[in-house]
Amino acid sequence: VLALVVLVVVGVLIFVWARRRFISGDGRPIMLCARRDSADERWRLGLARLGSERFEWFSMVGPSFRPEVSWLRGELDFGGAKPLADPIPGLAEPVSVSGGAAGRICEFAFAPAAYTAVRAWLESSPPGYNVNVA
């Protein structure tokens, strides 16, 4: 019985590691980020991935290799960051920002450096996008 328990625990750890490697596999930047759909809900820790065209959020725990939230870069709108009084395990001095696209609004919590990276990504143009604009 003990060997079976150890085998299950090792299997779960290997799966979590492999899922994390798959999510970040092609070199796109990922960062810790918490999300909640409304102020009444609790924060869910996950991974935010920035692509050339999409902002994607994956839950930290779960079997899915697909993002729970995926928005096009041109449609995404983030508000201003506010310091968060609630501690979120894994995020040092988190800042909260509301973001939305396509009629769906979520609140995200980032570490300050991660928020700066997301804001810079959002405000810059993706490669080849509006290249003829003067």
Image (tube, rainbow, N blue to C red):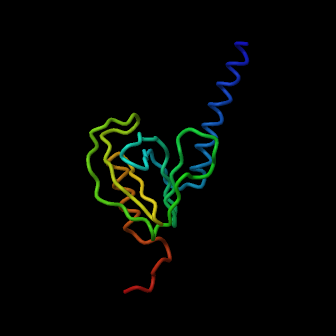
Q: Please say if 12 is above or below 50.
A: above
Tell me where residue 129 appears, x and y as whole percent: 48, 77
Residue at the (46%, 41%) spot, across then down: 44
Left or right of 82 on screen, residue 35: right
Residue 124, placed above or below residue 39: below
Residue 71 screen position, x and y as percent:
50, 62
User: Which quadrant is home to the C terminus?
Assistant: bottom left
Image quadrant in which you'd find residue 12? top right
> Relative to 113, does residue 128 appear above or below in the rendering?
below
Q: Quadrant of the N terminus?
A: top right
- Please state the horizontal and vertical placement of residue 86, each as a whole percent of the image: 31, 37
Where residue 40 appears, as percent x and y from the top left, is 38, 43
**Front in this rendered view, residue 17 or 105:** 105
- 100 or 5, which is in the foreground? 100
Q: Which residue lies furthest to the top in this view?
A: 2
Residue at 41%, 63% in the rendered image: 121
Name the residue: 49% across, 44% down. Answer: 46
Q: Residue at x 49, y 46 (%)?
A: 47
